[in-house]
Image (cartoon, rainbow, N blue to C red):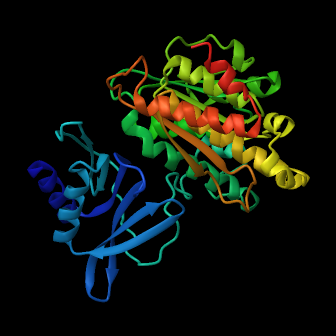
Amino acid sequence: MQRLEDILRQSAEAGLYQIVVSGPRRKNGAEKIKIRPVMLQGGLCYQESRFIGTKVFHENRTAAEMIRSAVELMDGGFRQMQIHAKGWQATVLAGKKGNLTIRKRMTETDFTPELSHNRKKNYILDESVPVGFLQDLGVQTRDGRIVRSRYDKFRQINRFLELIEDILPALPQEGPVQIVDFGCGKSYLTFAMYYYLKILKHYDVRIFGLDLKADVIRTCNGLCKKYGYRDLRFYQGDIKDFDKAERVDMVVSLHACDTATDYALFRAVKWNAKVIMAVPCCQHELNRQMACGPLAEVFSYGLLRERSAAMFTDALRGTLLEAQGYDTQILEFIDMEHTPKNIMIRAVRRAQSGESAGRPDRERQKKEKADALMAFLGVQPTLELLLREL
């Protein structure tokens, strides 16, 4: 930990811009922590922001307190830290046995820290930096300004990238990272994901986008050629028939309708993908099946039945993924005021552990809980049927 302490001290002395700590080892705590310098009446200090669910908790610290707190965070609590300072950046990765890997590199861009206590939102994609795909997709003007009517889309893109930032420690750190985006549509988020991982984070990635609409695929491939995005390709086709990649590290499925999400989740599990990020849409299947005496009065109201079906569908998907060896979270993707389809299922494969009777106890218990819930509701979701094939 001494080297990390030295790096943190150097960052404070050189001019710290930001520290981002992600990849929590435990649930029910902070999902991400950001540290930045702020100027208060008492002088320069460092504001630590802990993101817990939809809430953010702030605490101001001295330089010495900041360094001590940051070291403690990486001592068994979190897997990754990104340090941005004037003239250089560093990535800190924590292994299972507490050993740290620290990679420091010089950068040509010098950040100017925003020291005000109340500042504008610090997005991953800078509002003032022109980005080609944002311009061609109508989110940004040619001089780099965000189109006012498209600001919600800009926020959604950045929220998506924040959720990806959290799971970077789960992705392979060497060799190509292969990602499939099922039902990519106009591909705002697919392009953003490629730009973030390949251009900003310098990951070796191969990203495949898949959609049923031929005109959308032609447009997206045209944009790839225009920007020189050689490791991003789009294909027309159905999730069930995709065969362009034998090994997949991450599966993304955003707003795939009804059981299309289940097929995406199933393919991810079958590939043994390390990360799954799905934003379901139009959960009709359970709505047609639910028959539960104790909840009959609830289900007698169409609106409540519809919302209950969506809730139970995603709860079962999350539990079934847990039973397949994933740590699963149900997260708010974007504020409800922007879209009612605001739930994300984010799953990260757990490290393999010893098995009992062919299945770890935790996974067997999760499957039993899913079976009990399905029996109670009188339903048989597509994902459960598909997983029987494994």
The location of residue 349, given as percent across then percent down, is 44, 31
Tell me what residue is drawn at x 62 percent, y 51 percent: 333
> Can see residue 198?
no
Image position of 332 with respect to 263: above or below = below
**Direction from residue 114 to residue 74 in the image, left or right:** left
Tell me what residue is drawn at x 57 percent, y 52 percent: 159
The location of residue 329, given as percent across then percent down, is 53, 45
**Direction from residue 260 to residue 328 in the image, left or right:** left
Between 147 and 364, the one nearer to me in the picture: 364
Q: Residue furthest front?
A: 293
Q: Residue furthest bottom?
A: 41
> Can see residue 211?
yes
Image position of 118 with respect to 308: above or below = below
Between 225 and 368, the one nearer to me in the picture: 368
Identify the image quadrant of the C terminus.
top right
The mark total stands at 0
Q: Image quarter for residue 251?
A: top right
**Direction from residue 106 to residue 200 in the image, left or right:** right
Tell me what residue is drawn at x 83 percent, y 34 percent: 289
Image position of 39 with respect to 232: above or below = below
Tell me what residue is drawn at x 37 percent, y 59 percent: 33
**Direction from residue 355 to residue 220 in the image, left or right:** right
Q: Residue furthest left?
A: 2
Between 86 and 259, the one nearer to me in the picture: 259
The location of residue 75, given as percent across then percent down, is 20, 50
The location of residue 200, given as percent across then percent down, is 44, 41
Between 359 and 351, the one nearer to me in the picture: 359
Image position of 294 with respect to 375: above or below = below
